[in-house]
Amino acid sequence: MTVQTETTKESFTLGAYIEGIREGWPEPDIERWIVCGLPRDFNILGVAEQRKALAERVPLTHSKWDALLAAVVEHVAWLHGHERPAWVDEPERFLDSTWVLSPIRSGRMESLMYAPAAFLRHGAIPDPRDLDSRGGERYEWTP
C-alpha cells in the first residue's frame, strides 16, 4: 500500500482520493486520507487551482466513500468561497442512512451535533476532531 502524504499543486487531483478505495486500503487509511488529507492538500492550492480541481468530476466507487468524498469536497468548496461542484449532487453520492464514522459513543454524539451542513446533507459524518485548522480548515467546528 502506498499512501500519498502530501499533494503538490501540480499533481493535485480529486480523482486521486479514490485510489485507496479501488486498491482496497484499510478503511482507517481511506478515511484519514479523505477527511484529513484532502482539506490540507486543497488548502495549499491557489484560487485558480482550486476552481480547476472542483470542476473535475470524481468517478464513483459505488461505496459509502462516494458520499464522504462528496461531503468533504462540498465542505472545502464552501470554506474557500467556491460554488459546490454539480457532481456532488449526484444521487449516488448520498447515503440512505446516516454513517457516523466515530466508533466512540460520545464522539458520535458530537459528530451529529457539530457537523457542517455538507456532511449532514450527504449522510457521511466524520469525527469533529478530524477537521480542524491544522488540517486545512479555516474554522474549527468542534465544541
Image: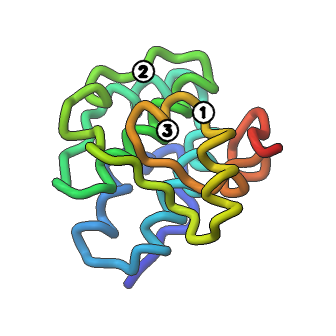
Question: What is the CA distance from the residue labelled 2 to the residue labelled 3?
Answer: 13 Å
Q: The residue under label 3 is which amino acid type?
A: Phe
- Taking the image as shown, residue 83 lies to the left or right of residue 91, namely right
Q: The residue under label 1 is which amino acid type?
A: Pro
* Marks 2,3: beta carbons within 8 A: no
- Secondary structure under tag 3 reads helix
* Marks 1,3: beta carbons within 8 A: yes
Q: Residue at x 29, y 38 (%)?
A: 94
Query: Would you place residue 26 above or below residue 60 in this image?
Result: below
Q: Could you say which is closer to the camera, residue 127 or residue 80?
A: 127
Q: What residue would you read off at disc 1?
A: 116
* Marks 2,1: beta carbons within 8 A: no
Q: The residue under label 2 is which amino acid type?
A: Arg
Image quarter of the N terminus: bottom left
Residue 82, position as x, y percentages in the image: 52, 17
- Category of crowding for the residue at label 3, using alpha-carbon neighbours closer than 10 angstroms: few (below 14), some (14–19), many (at least 20): many
Residue 84 - label: 2
- Please tell me in which quadrant of the rendered image residue 64 appears: bottom left
Residue 119 - label: 3
- Secondary structure under tag 2 reads loop
**Of the two numbered discs 2 and 3 in the rendering, the one whose residue sits closer to the viewer:** 3
